[in-house]
Image (cartoon, helix red, strand yellow):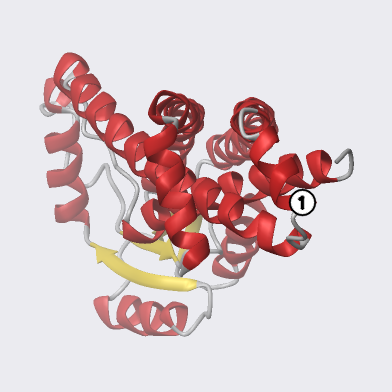
Amino acid sequence: MLSLRTAISSFRRAPLLSVLTITTIAFSLFAFGLFGLVALNIRTALQHIEERVEIRAFVAENTPIERLDSASTAVRAFHEVQSVDIVTQQQALARARRELGEFKDVFESEFLPASLDVRLKPGFRDPASVRRVAERLREFEVVDDIRFGEEWITQLYKLRNIAGVVGSALGLAFAAVAVIIIGATIRMAVMARAREISIMHLVGATDGFIRRPFLIEGSIKGICGGVLALGLTWIALRLLEGYLHLETMFFDRQLAALGVLFGALIGLVGSALSVDRHLRHV
């Protein structure tokens, strides 16, 4: 309790320095948060595109509907398969005319074959899994041809892997810069109270007793900076949505809480390192 009162009183003694520390933490985490939002929305967009991955197995002409039902049931039993839709020739014609309206007069009911449209479960939409399921579908007697956009799926996963690697590298760089800037700012706050630390040390206070108020103070500043950064990120996202007319995602509650906790951790670690470094020279 004494350490907490001491930490709170330090805010009153040096309000400008406290505000500077909180602001530095906030803007450092704000930059990191903006990058995190970009990475989150890119990943979400790629997931939405990935959901469209499907295998279309065209069936032989004049295949009885009973055999299609039997084949559909067998394909649904694959552990990779999420759903199977039977598309008749009439349904295929209606879909083609709907999706390619400018060419709707070109298509005839006999022109488009019936098909089994197979969608895969999450985790089985990579090129290797799709190719494996497609090869199993070719073994069915009713299947005449297979289409699944192999090149498109391969390019999609290359893009996702590149985005993941670049995102991780830039994220680590942003985090490192934020920690360095925040650490330097907190060190300034500790140095401003160097005389107080020296006096406490001279009167017999242990290192742990001296360190605790600074750790609490650093954590409180980190939490305040994290909350402020979260608010700034939310405002920036809403302004961007209004300007670009985009539908974007914000951090969920768990990610938002982790962001605030990360601010507290940075404040705690920065204070601990700065105080320990100063205590070694007292």
Compared with 227, 240 (above or below) is: above
Please give the name of the residue rendered at 17% of the width and 26% of the height, measured from the top-left corner: 106
Instruction: Name the residue furthest top.
Output: 243
Q: Image check: 64 left or right of 95?
A: right
Question: Total number of numbered labels?
Answer: 1
Query: x, y (%) of residue 77?
Result: 47, 85
Instruction: Using the image as rendered, state which of residue 24 and residue 145 is in the foreground.
Output: 24
| Residue 78 drawn above or below residue 143 | below
Quadrant location of the C terminus?
Answer: top right
Secondary structure, mark 1, is helix
* Residue neighbourhood size for the residue with mark 1, other residues' Cα within 10 Å, grouped as few (<14), some (14–19), many (≥20): some
The residue closer to the viewer here, 224 or 61, is 224
- Residue 235 placement: quadrant: top left
Q: Taking 54 as reference, is 107 above or below it?
A: above
Left or right: residue 139 compared with residue 250: right
- Location of mark 1 (residue): 201
| Image side of residue 232 versus residue 243, left or right | right
Asked if residue 261 is positioned above or below residue 65 in the image, the reply reads above
Which residue is at 48% across, 37% downward? 36
Q: Label 1 sits on what residue type?
A: His
Near-viewer residue (105 or 126): 126
Is 89 left, or right, of 18 in this rendering? Answer: left
- Most extreme residue toward the right is 281
Q: Position of residue 237 (x, y in %)?
A: 27, 28
Tell me which residue sits at (14%, 20%) in the image.
Answer: 242
